[in-house]
Image: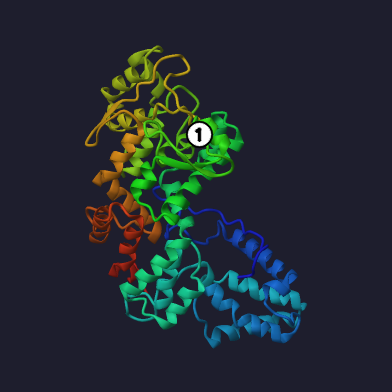
């Protein structure tokens, strides 16, 4: 709204749900975080008055006429909808009241703060004063914009509120396909949260990685998602199993692959070793730890998050290391430890399902390098039989099989719709809308664009969530 250079407001993240932060029930302003919003609004308002020529779009800042011209665009831009004369009048009165006792700059900043702290700015409305269960055109535009781009509606979408019928699924599809070119933030944030990569930097530090390489791993992830999903209109299969990535020379050398030149470039990978998000450093390091193996961390993460299983937790007070030592002793191989753990209660109730997934990634060290032997010289044995999926020699084979697995697909659809809409609709096999989206994903070769379009075309997309009252 104000151009470049505006100070960032440090707003704490709300509580996550299934690892996802875009959750309506948790994204609230309360006594615990209100001061962050107030401080942020004050900082921005002060900047606006100090940079008035740019921020206010006035050539006559300091005069009464500038207030009126500012109010002609700013509230509507902030509220992401048309504003009425009553709202403009209230804000003008606020300025006049403040200016009666304080300097012009202070009064002007007060108007900016009032708008930035208004519920109309901080929240996206899905409520109405009438009886209709359908969202208003402005509400639909806001939902489309934030769900697809993680930003406010652009000028074209705001114009469509007045000139097009956003209750028409064909119109929503047209807007959705147009907005996809600006959707990189949504996809990057979703896969980052769904696959739990927020621990990349802390785990990189634990396993002794050069911070510069950790940054390059994040850059690899973000460039890969941008290129595959947005630029190439790729599929879920591409995201999870593409035999190429994008990286800088230093990271390519660390991985042991050939870089074509300088800078961020596409790098071809050996599919017997790497391919897709699950073999990139961002995911591997996020689920790595100091020690010999990473079977539990990596296997349990995929089992719970990517396949939507509820894994049990060890009984309170259970000394896992002591139990494991009693089962196999200090000199057991990773395979011997896995077999003993999986066949013993209470460990086996979870581990016999998650461990066969985790061991497939044992050819990757905690810091994401390729390995065929452990530090103690013992050979890595990553072959595995995963229940209902098949037998695998490497992680890339597993990732390819996961994409074709209906359970994995349904979990992906459920989690993405949870993230996109801010509410968990339920499992795809139990909810008609989610099931229809899953069927569309399958029918289009796992096209992410077609999946997203099927979500926004559905009648439920523009209905207010159950329980909202006027």
Counting from the top left corner in percent of width and height, residue 424 is at 34, 56
Q: Classify the position of the C terminus by image quarter.
A: bottom left
Q: Secondary structure at mark 1?
A: loop
What is the quadrant of residue 312 in the picture?
Answer: top left
The structure residue drawn at horizontal position 35% and vertical position 74%, both measured from the top left corner, is 171
Q: Is residue 176 left or right of residue 45?
A: left
> Residue 399: x, y in percent?
33, 39
Q: Position of residue 175 (x, y in %)?
A: 40, 70
Q: Residue at x 53, y 70 (%)?
A: 121
Say if 432 sits above or below 243 in the image.
below
Q: Is residue 151 visible?
A: yes
Residue 422 visible to the viewer: no
Residue 60 image position (x, y, % from top left): 74, 82
Q: Is residue 104 left or right of residue 385?
A: right
Residue 107 located left or right of residue 15 = right
For label 1, count other residues whose C-alpha is less than 10 Å away and answer few (under 14), some (14-19) or many (20+): few
Establish if 358 lies above or below 182. Answer: above
Q: Quadrant of residue 379?
A: top left
Quarter-wise, where is residue 335 in the image? top left
**Quarter containing the N terminus:** bottom right
Query: What kind of colouring is applied to the model shown?
Result: rainbow
* Residue matched to label 1: 258
């Amino acid at each position: 709204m104000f151009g470049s250079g505006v100070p960032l407001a440090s707003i704490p993240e709300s509580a996550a749900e299934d690892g996802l932060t875009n959750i309506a029930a948790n994204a609230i302003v309360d006594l615990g975080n209100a001061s962050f919003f107030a401080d942020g609004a004050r900082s921005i308002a002060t900047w606006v008055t100090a940079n008035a020529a740019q921020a206010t779009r006035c050539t006559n800042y300091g005069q009464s006429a500038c207030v009126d011209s500012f109010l002609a665009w700013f509230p509507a831009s902030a509220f992401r909808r048309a504003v009425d004369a009553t709202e403009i009048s209230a804000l003008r009165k606020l300025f006049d009241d403040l200016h009666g006792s304080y300097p012009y700059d202070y009064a002007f900043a007060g108007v900016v703060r009032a708008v930035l702290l208004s519920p109309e700015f901080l929240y996206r409305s899905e409520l109405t004063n009438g009886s209709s269960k359908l969202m208003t055109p402005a509400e639909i535009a806001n939902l489309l914009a934030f769900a697809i781009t993680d930003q406010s509606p652009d000028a074209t979408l705001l114009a469509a509120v007045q000139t097009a019928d956003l209750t028409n699924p064909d119109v929503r599809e047209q807007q959705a396909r147009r907005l996809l070119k600006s959707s990189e933030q949504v996809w990057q944030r979703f896969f980052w949260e769904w696959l739990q990569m927020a621990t990349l930097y802390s785990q990189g530090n634990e396993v002794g990685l050069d911070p510069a390489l950790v940054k390059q791993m994040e850059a690899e992830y973000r460039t890969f998602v941008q290129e595959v999903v947005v630029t190439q209109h790729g599929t879920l299969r591409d995201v999870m199993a593409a035999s190429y990535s994008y990286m800088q020379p230093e990271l390519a050398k660390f991985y042991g692959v050939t870089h074509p030149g300088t800078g961020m470039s596409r790098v071809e990978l050996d599919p017997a070793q790497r391919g897709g998000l699950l073999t990139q450093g961002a995911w591997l390091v996020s689920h790595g730890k100091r020690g010999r193996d990473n079977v539990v961390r990596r296997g349990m993460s995929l089992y719970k998050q990517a396949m939507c299983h509820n894994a049990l937790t060890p009984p309170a007070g259970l000394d896992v290391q002591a139990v494991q030592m009693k089962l196999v002793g200090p000199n057991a191989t990773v395979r011997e430890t896995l077999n003993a753990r999986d066949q013993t209660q209470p460990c086996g109730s979870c581990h016999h399902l998650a461990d066969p997934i985790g061991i497939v990634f044992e050819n990757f060290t905690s810091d994401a390098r390729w390995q065929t032997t452990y530090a103690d010289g013992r050979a890595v044995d990553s072959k595995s039989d995963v229940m209902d999926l098949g037998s695998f020699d490497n992680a890339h084979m597993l990732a390819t099989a996961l994409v074709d697995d209906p359970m994995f697909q349904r979990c992906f659809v459920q989690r993405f719709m949870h993230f996109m809409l801010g509410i968990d609709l339920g499992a795809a096999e139990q909810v008609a809308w989610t099931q229809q989206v899953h069927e569309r994903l399958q029918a289009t070769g796992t096209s992410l664009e077609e999946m997203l379009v099927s979500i926004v075309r559905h009648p439920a997309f523009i209905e207010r969530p159950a329980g909202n009252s006027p």
